[in-house]
Amino acid sequence: MKNEMTQTPLLQIDALEKRFALDHGFLETVKLRKGRIRREKREVHAVNGLTLDIKRGEALCIVGESGCGKSTVARLVAGLLNPSNGSITYDGKRIDTLTRREMLPYRRKMQMIFQNPYASLNPRMTIEQALTEPVKHHHPDLSAQGVRDKVVEVMRSVGVDPAWAPRYPHEFSGGQRQRIAIARALTVDPEFIIADEPISALDVSIQAQVLNLMLEAQVERGLTYLFITHDLSVVQHFGTRVAVLYLGTLCELSDTATLFANPKHPYTRALLSAVPKLDDQAPNHIRLRGEIPTPIDMPQGCPFRSRCTYANDRCAVERPVPAPQPDGSLVACHAVEEDRIETV
Amino acid sequence: MSLLSVQGLTVKFAMRNNTVTALNDISFDIGQGERVGIVGESGAGKSITGFSILNLLSRPGYIAGGSIMFDGQDLTKLSDKQFRTIRGNRIAMIFQDPMVTLNPVLTIGQQMVEQLQAHRRVSRKDAEIIAVAKLREVYIPAPEERLKQYPHELSGGMRQRIVIAIALLLDPQLIIADEPTTALDVTIQADIMELLLELCESNNVSLILITHDLGVVSQMTQRMLVMYAGRIIETGGTREIINDPQHPYTQGLINALPQQTLPGEKLRQIPGNMPALSAIPPGCPFHPRCGYAVPTCRTVRPELRRHGGSDVACIEVERLHGTTPHKVDYA
């Protein structure tokens, strides 16, 4: 937390864009339009000009609903996808243009944890094999004993008995598998962890165990997290800062406490009000009406305007850009800028 | 008299080497128009409870004991043919994933008409009029158009609304909703839950809501059952249980939620996992994970009895209040 203002961010995402082609091959692109044959390529606009930075030691959470591009951002940062536009800079070095070989040291520093531990562990490898493989790959000069020591140390730290190393993933429960997936990420001593919905597939009591483990690892190993989730109560607990995404664009970026105490963007407000709380006696939320636009033909203007009660003519033509607010948050909304939203 | 009365329901699964007990002596009642939540983690038996009521258990599962009285009839004693007059007609079910519930090769209209004609003598034209009226009840815009559409042409929230419309088609007395919004986004979930609540209230329909989300149960139900390893371990008024849970497991479940802890602090986790059905410990099934367990918990099976605002299956419940749990060494 100290002198974080003066530090350069660990990761900088600048004007990041990712489009996926919907029509593959020549034939799919040929269309008949007004009696003439034309070539047209449709694209899914998954991420549209996202600018973010992640400071060392923080946990930046990205929240949003399905299809908002949050997992795409995680995959772009991890280098599993190539951006269509924009850049990703890690510790001062641009990484999205590197070759596979040049990327290798960064893959050690950045590790990823996926949502489904049933799919992310190879069913035919024992836990020991799954955990030693990354160590051997990234530290080829380490002795066999050194590798084993490392694996045992990490298994202990995530609360999995090292005696279970010869077992296969199917012998473990979902929560234990996710611990093993976390252990695998930690074996190579990363400094940055990208976690894509790491607890969504787990039961409530197990979610708490895994979140605690991730918090412990953050303190003990000085980790920085990019945490992707749709669960706002987890964000409130885990995140240092929160970025709210809608259709691949940034709505609001703010300190966690500020966001929950004083959400500004109409979408953020609706999202927060929709979370069922223990003391609610009846559903009690801001209703969003109107159709959700598809990311195939991105609407002009504000992407949220079709469901927004504050939308006006300006919102239909001009896309809002994230603007700093007095409390330090960034909000992309004309209604907020023009002060048209009543405060609660 | 209650609409549905489940007494001593036991469900077993005959496996190759042994028989496991998925539901162990479950009893509860639901009155007309009452909304009850069933809460628990995966493997607790919540879905099996719903399936048993509708006779949807498939082999190797079977009802090994107990009765399910619905409006004076024992559902466990009905033939398949008799059951078809009840299932979908007087008791409807809403499943988690609307894409699996709806038939992808039939239009919405075909599916709704088929449902109506299976239970009532109506012409196709009349059936379509009823279908449109039901779609309008669940706030589907341009319902006449939707009848001609296929499920894949609609969004997830829209599909689940249609599933609810189909469930309501024959004016059932009881709806069993098994995780109806788990596959949906929070903003859509909130809309669907509000709709379901409104429809249950206006038509005086009873609801069994199966979910793992305590917030949803709090919003939607009057009473709740908490299940663990095939047993009901606590039951009572929803408000009473959420405000003052009696069973250590219920307490653990509520305390483990991130909103129950200050940001950045460690969450109060429950150690260990739910036991597999083939390895349910003797005595209280929760004792290996329980911070209040005493030696008798390992041998004596607790029965439900009144304490505080609810019925609790815990022999030590009187001692719990005012004591702190000891640390659990969970292997």
Image: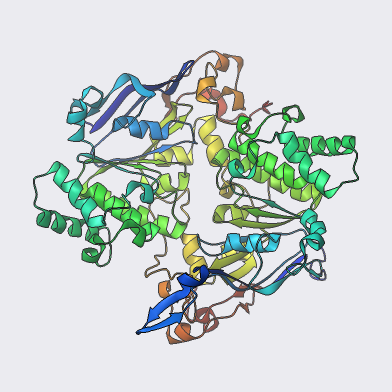
Horizontally, residue B251 falls left or right of residue A167, namely left
Q: At which x and y percent is residue A294?
A: 45, 69
* Image-quadrant location for residue A16: bottom right
Which residue corresponds to the image point at 57% horizontal and 38% vertical from the top-left?
A: A205
The colouring scheme, among rainbow, by chain, secondary structure or one colour, is rainbow
Horizontally, residue B15 falls left or right of residue A148, namely left
Which residue corresponds to the image point at 73% horizontal and 42% vertical from the top-left?
A: A183
Which residue corresponds to the image point at 59% horizontal and 49% vertical from the top-left?
A: A115
Q: Does any portion of residue A263 appear in the rendered image?
A: no
Q: At which x and y percent is residue A216?
A: 74, 45
Q: At which x and y percent is residue A37?
A: 41, 82
Q: Which quadrant of the rendered structure holds the N terminus of chain A?
A: bottom right
Q: At which x and y percent is residue B120?
A: 11, 44
Q: Between residues A286 and A144, which one lies in front from this camera angle?
A: A144
Q: Does any portion of residue A330 appear in the rendered image?
A: yes
Q: Between residues A47 and B250, which one lies in front from this camera angle?
A: A47
Q: Is residue B249 above or below residue B9?
A: below
Q: Between residues A236 and B322, which one lies in front from this camera angle?
A: A236
Q: How many marks?
A: 0
Q: Is residue A143 above or below residue B184?
A: above
Which residue corresponds to the image point at 24% horizontal and 58% vertical from the top-left?
A: B135
Q: Is residue B237 above or below residue B219?
A: above
Horizontally, residue B120 falls left or right of residue B109, namely left
